[in-house]
Image: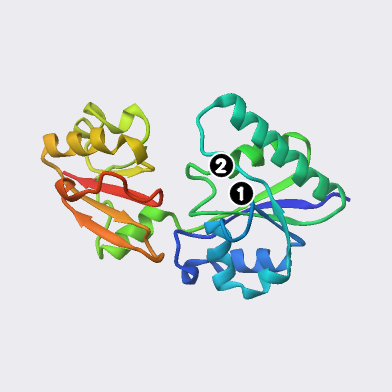
Amino acid sequence: MSGILYGVGVGPGDPELLTLKAMRILRESDVIAIPSETKEACTAYRIAQGACPELERKELLPVPMPMTKDPSALERSHEAAANAIAGQLEQGRQVAFVTLGDPTVYSTYLYIHRKIAGRGYETAIVSGIPSFCAAAARLNQGLAEQAQPLHILPGTYHSASGDGITALRGTKVLMKTGKNMASVRGSILESGQEAVLVENCGMPGEAVYHGAASFPDNPSYYSLIIVKE
């Protein structure tokens, strides 16, 4: 009988935001898969370990994921990860793949999830608190009320710059802005909308920047922007 693969969302950074279900699945799993070469370099693992110290005694399965948009390189890494995880499942072992935030929101885990499910193995997703919800709580404010729409946009793509910000009504959350910061910041300033950047929410080095003009040129990878009309 083959094992089960769980995609476990560990939340945005604060170990106290790990859900009870996530903690139970991590404790029950035979193997912890991490999207990194080592546990020291894996933010998701460090967050989970902060809530579940017993992870130190678990077997780790490193499945590195390159930071690239090259389709060929991504496909190779995803296939290699799926092969490694399938090898564990074939032995009847339960595998927990830890991922930041929630596994359903811009998560690399989803690629592995589909490959494993496509091979006929049992898979399940364990929800985690999304970074934009934690950031709004950190700012002590809501994201959307009554009929206001809420838009979640990948900041590294065209939709988050230019007319993509000014044309959408309600609240916009820009995730993983990265090298597109200059374009995004310029669009927000031109639109005259209110914006806050939260960097490393719930983690060491947390910082909050109010107003697009104050946004750093090279924010941490773990940063997001909340834009309101």
Q: In this view of the protein, can residue 116 be seen by the observer?
A: no
What coloring was used for the rendering?
A: rainbow
Q: Are marks 2 and 1 in contact (CB under 8 Å)?
A: yes
Residue at 33%, 63% in the rendered image: 206
Relative height, residue 205 to residue 86 (above, below) = below
In the rendered image, residue 197, in percent from the top left (x then y), is placed at: 26, 52
Q: Residues within 10 Å of mark 2 (few under 14, many from 20)?
A: some
Q: Nearer the viewer, residue 67 or 12?
A: 67
Residue at left 36%, top 40%?
Answer: 178
Q: Amino acid at mark 1?
A: Pro
Residue 43: where, in percent of width, then height?
Answer: 52, 58
Q: Which mark is residue 110?
A: none
Q: Residue furthest bottom?
A: 53
Q: Which image quadrant: the C terminus?
A: top left
Seen in the picture, residue 194 relative to 24 is either above or below; the reply is: above
Q: Which residue is mark 1?
A: 35
Q: Position of residue 163 (x, y in %)?
A: 22, 27
Q: Is residue 76 above or below residue 23?
A: above
What amino acid type should be assigned to the residue bearing mark 2? Thr
Q: Judge the density around disc 1: few (<14), some (14-19), many (≥20) Cα neighbours within 10 Å.
A: many
Q: Kindly state the secondary structure of the residue where label 1 is placed.
A: loop
- Residue 64 falls in image quadrant: top right
Identify the residue at image location x=61%, y=25%: 72
The picture quadrant where one finds residue 71 is top right
Q: Earlier in the sequence, mark 2 or mark 1?
A: 1
**Residue that badge 2 annotates:** 108
Q: Can the viewer see residue 79?
A: yes
Between disc 2 and disc 1, the foreground one is: 1
Quarter residue 46 falls in? bottom right
105 to the left or right of 147: right
**Residue at x 22%, y 48% (from the top left corner):** 215
Give the alpha-carbon distance from disc 2 to disc 1, as whole Å: 8 Å
